[in-house]
Image: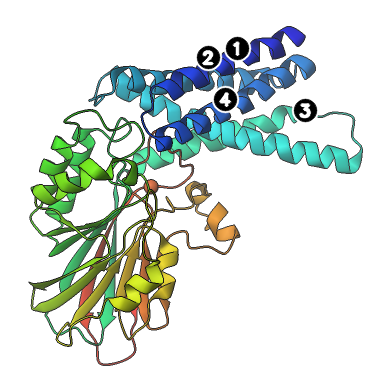
Amino acid sequence: MALWLGSLVPFYGVTLWGVYRGGRTRNDHLMAFVVTGCFGVYGLLGAGALLAWQARWPVLVGLGLGAALLAPPFVMLARRRDPGRGLGWWLMLASQPAYAFAFWGGCVLGIWLVSTLATGAASFWPGPWLWVALALALWGSVWGLALGQRVLRLRVEVPRARGPGLRLLQLSDIHFGPGFPLWKLRALCDQAAALAPDLVLITGDLVGPFSDSPGEHDGLVETLAALPAPVLFCPGNHDMPRWRTLGPELRAGGVTVLEDETVCLDVAGERVWVLGVGFPWGRARVPAAEVIRGAVPPDDASLRLVLSHGPAVLDHLSADSADMGFAGHTHGGPVSLGMLGLPVSILRLTASHDKGLHHRGGVWHYVHSGNWLIGMPPRIGTAPEIVVVEVVPSAGPAHSCC
Ligand SMILES: [Fe+2]
């Protein structure tokens, strides 16, 4: 037992050092600590298995998944380039159930510890309950991968709208990088193009941790620029560590970058005004509420949209200044029981925005669940989505349907 615990110290030390040294920004290093923290649960599970020698198989399978989790960070940091469809990609896939088992296994351990302390039971080891953690991890991963990019269609009535119907398509949190390589981005954009949008809105986090190799964003920019509709983008937290290069690359490639900026477009019979709110990381900037107050839509705008990475910004919108706000950032929970059909997530339990359509203060809000699924940062029990919003005129009270 002492030998096991003693071996964990150099194991975690080497893992953290290996992942950490490959990073180039504070964001990369933050994610390195997240990855290594996940391994902490595996160490506890192994120690518990040695102590109690119960439920060996779920622990052994879970530890095997943990070993698979080791590989992806090292592979992507060593290569620092797109994994394509090769071994690196399969290792990235293996990391998904490994992260999930670390989370669910940790939950089972925590619940068991509290209950045994409360009841005075002799055992501090959950034993067969770890099968539940393993089943949740495997089913959640299979469910998310099998769904792919789900298309969610919404129809929203806006009193000011005057055209025959404007089709907005929202993407968010693509996290282009080792977990979302170029071939997946092209497949996503092909699927988006086939939906014939009038405008494409991307609400931040185009890139992810460990994605700043020279020339790495060329394919990203070219693929977005090839979409058959104007692409409007506001930055997210994961974009900010690379913003000095990524922002100009996107602008030069034809993407309309809105960082506390507005634009007016005439599309499908509508005069569309869009405000994109920047993200506060890495610099001092005007608070979002002031940005929204200071951005006055023109009188002839028939549709007023606001893009933000963080959904809390949408709380500053009012019917005087906006018809609809779009956000992302939450990753659908980011831990959810969506794979069991239950509307439960960590964010929802804390009464925060997690995902979906809301109507507040006369303004529509849509919080996107994100388009990436694999790798860092981890997300568990939630699925990607492509959101298509059909905007049509309305004379009566606003409402929507799917
Ligand atoms: Fe994100």
Ligand 1 within 8 Å of disc 2? The answer is no
Q: Residue type at mark 1?
A: Pro
Tell me the SS state at disc 2: helix
Q: Residue type at mark 4?
A: Phe
Sequence order check, earlier mark of 4 and 2: 2
Q: Residue type at mark 3?
A: Trp
Relative to 315, say whether 388 is above or below.
Answer: above
Tell me the SS state at disc 3: loop
Question: What is the distance, in whole Å, between disc 2 and disc 1 at their CAs?
Answer: 6 Å
Instruction: Say which residue label 3 marks.
Output: 125
> Which numbered dot is residue 39?
4
Task: Please rate how many residues cluster around mark 1, counting C-alpha atoms within 10 Å: few if below 14, some from 14 to 19, many from 20.
Answer: few
User: What residue is shown at x 48% (from left), y 63% (from top)?
Assistant: 353
> What is the residue that sits farthest to the right in this orientation?
120
Instruction: Please say if the residues under marks 3 and 1 sit with CB atoms less than 8 Å apart.
Output: no
Instruction: Please say if the residues under marks 3 and 2 sit with CB atoms less than 8 Å apart.
Output: no
Nearer the camera: disc 3 or disc 1: 1
Relative to 273, say whether 229 is above or below.
Answer: above
Task: Please rate how many residues cluster around mark 3, counting C-alpha atoms within 10 Å: few if below 14, some from 14 to 19, many from 20.
Answer: many
Sequence order check, earlier mark of 4 and 3: 4
